[in-house]
Image (cartoon, rainbow, N blue to C red):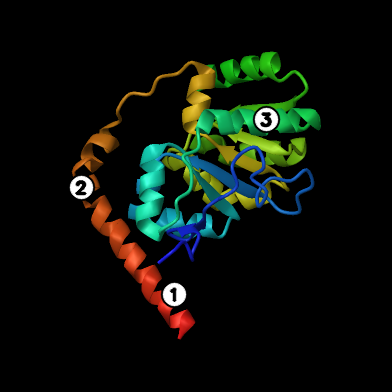
Amino acid sequence: MSCTFRQFFGLPLIEDAPPDLAPVWGATRTAPGILFFAGRSFLWRLVRSRRVRTGLAGKNAAVVPAGGGARWQTRLACGCDIGKYSAFQGLIRLLSRAEEDQAAIFIVDSDPKAVRRIEENLRITFPGLRIVGRAAFTPAIATSVTTAIRKAEPRIVLIGCARKPVLRWMIGQYDQVGNALAIVASQAVDRMAGRRRGISPGDLLGAPLQLLVPLLLVGHRLVLIHRWKKLQA
């Protein structure tokens, strides 16, 4: 089967190479959206967590496979040879395009020091961007972050963390922020913030399960093939 269903476990795959990302990017938006520059670990999270998949499916979310591992996973799961995109270069191109329009941007990360470094780097590298707010996210202030973004009316919300609390916030509240596009690019933002992430306990516990990834992806593709044949019948 060729790439008939351009989705990864229910989330659309962006096929256009940056800087266009035409289906998602737009100077004038009529609804909020979420764009994930997704590496191998985030795609694996989509595979194993139905709650994340179904929650994001209703939030106008889409995936850009970032890196060779992500490209391999999407090709195995749905036959779509997309990528391999560089998360950092893709983000830089999107921000460059936003700077041309003097777009407003809001920064969200779970680390206060990272938030400050990201803001400093954006002001130096993209002086034409208007930074209209920033937040060091914790679950306790989730509602306040949502309100701050809605009042600031940014075009882009740059999110540097895709851990569970941030995902829960996006699933639960992001449709209340206005028409902003959230760009979730943790690897690229780590580089921008000069941050190195260690291996979390969750990653260690989940490592044995990753041996099942090829079987799960192939099984998903077989389901898509069956669905495609039914549509052709």
Q: Tell me: residue 184, above or below residue 230.
A: above
The local crowd at label 2, few if under 14, some if 14 to 19, many if 20 or more residues have their Cα within 10 Å, is few
- Residue type marked 1: Trp
Q: Secondary structure at mark 3?
A: helix
* Residue denoted by label 2: 211
- Residue type marked 2: Leu
- In this view, the residue in front, 75 or 181, is 75
Q: Position of residue 189 (x, y in %)?
A: 53, 26
Sequence-wise first label, 3 or 1 = 3
Residue 228 has which mark? 1
Query: Is 48 on the left-hand or right-hand side of 184?
Result: left
Sequence-wise first label, 2 or 3 = 3
> From the viewer's perspective, is the residue at label 2 or at label 1 nearer?
1
Sequence-wise first label, 2 or 1 = 2
Name the residue located 32 percent from the left edge and 57 percent from the top edge: 217
Q: How far apart in space, not on screen, are marks 2 and 1 (Cα)?
A: 28 Å
Q: Position of residue 99 (x, y in %)?
A: 75, 28
Q: Position of residue 187 (x, y in %)?
A: 46, 29
Quadrant of the rendered structure where residue 158 is?
top right
Quadrant of the rendered structure where residue 126 is?
top right
- Residue type marked 3: Leu
Q: Are marks 2 and 1 in contact (CB under 8 Å)?
A: no
Q: How far apart in space, not on screen, are marks 2 and 3 (Cα)?
A: 37 Å
Q: How far apart in space, not on screen, are marks 3 and 1 (Cα)?
A: 37 Å
Residue 95 has which mark? 3
Name the residue located 28 percent from the left edge and 37 percent from the top edge: 202
Q: Position of residue 84 (x, y in %)?
A: 46, 39
Q: Are marks 3 and 1 in contact (CB under 8 Å)?
A: no
Which image quadrant: the N terminus? bottom left
